[in-house]
Image: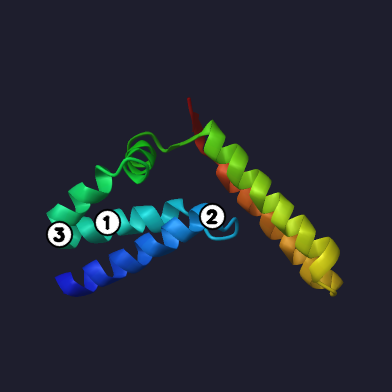
């Protein structure tokens, strides 16, 4: 079972890292899932993850404070809206899909803004 947790944790970590660069792929849920899976399977991997220079503070801040840094909020919301608006105006031909994309963008924006801002 530990091997399975490690495998899924590593897959989740890869998706979380991709989410940093792809605006529609969420980073935080995948990193939190990675932390939980590594916690259950390998103390060494869990400690390694929390001690990472870039990912460690992000995970610790979210788990301890339920907060997202202002810079991360601005970047994620901006990139998401740029991507969604580009798709709505230039890619998607169907009006119902455009409406769904805008509803998703509004929902994700609300969700991100619902967390406290870490200063």
> Quick check: 41 left or right of 95?
left
What whole-number distance in Å separates the C-alpha atoms at marks 3 and 2? 27 Å
Image point (30%, 65%), residue name = 10
Position of residue 112 measured from the top left corner of the image (x, y, whole percent): 56, 44
Q: Disc 2 on helix, strand or loop?
A: helix
Q: Is residue 91 left or right of residue 77?
A: right
Q: Quadrant of the N terminus?
A: bottom left
Element class at badge 1 = helix
Q: Nearer the viewer, mark 1 or mark 2?
A: 2
The residue to which callout 3 is attached is 42
Neighbours of disc 2 within 10 Å: few (<14), some (14-19), many (20+): few
In contact (CB < 8 Å): disc 3 and disc 1: no
Which label sits on residue 36?
Answer: 1
| In the foreground, 65 or 30 | 30
Q: Earlier in the sequence, mark 3 or mark 1?
A: 1
Q: Which is more foreground, mark 3 or mark 2? A: 2
Q: Name the mark on residue 77.
A: none
The spot of residue 6 in percent (x, y) is 23, 67
Spatial CA distance of label 3 from label 1 is 10 Å
Q: Residue at x 19, y 55 (%)?
A: 45
Dot placed on the residue nearer the N-terminal end, 3 or 2: 2
Name the residue located 21 percent from the left edge and 52 percent from the top edge: 46
Q: Quadrant of residue 16?
A: bottom left
> Does 51 sit left or right of 59 as displayed?
left
Label 2 sits on residue:
21
Looking at the image, residue 21 lies above or below residue 68: below
Viewer-nearest of labels 3 and 1? 3
Q: Nearer the viewer, residue 31 or 110?
A: 31
Residue 113 versus residue 18 in the image, above or below: above
Residue 32, position as x, y percentages in the image: 35, 53
């Amino acid at each position: 079972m530990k091997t399975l947790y490690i495998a899924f944790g590593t897959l989740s970590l890869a998706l979380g890292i991709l989410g940093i660069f792809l605006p529609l792929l969420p980073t935080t849920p995948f990193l939190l899932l990675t932390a939980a899976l590594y916690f259950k399977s390998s103390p060494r991997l869990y400690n390694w993850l929390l001690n990472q220079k870039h990912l460690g503070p992000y995970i610790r801040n979210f788990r301890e404070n339920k907060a997202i840094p202002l810079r991360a909020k601005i970047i994620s919301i901006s990139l998401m809206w740029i991507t969604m608006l580009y798709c709505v105006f230039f890619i998607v031909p169907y009006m119902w899909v455009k409406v769904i994309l805008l509803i998703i963008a509004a929902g994700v924006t609300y969700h991100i803004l619902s967390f406290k801002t870490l200063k």
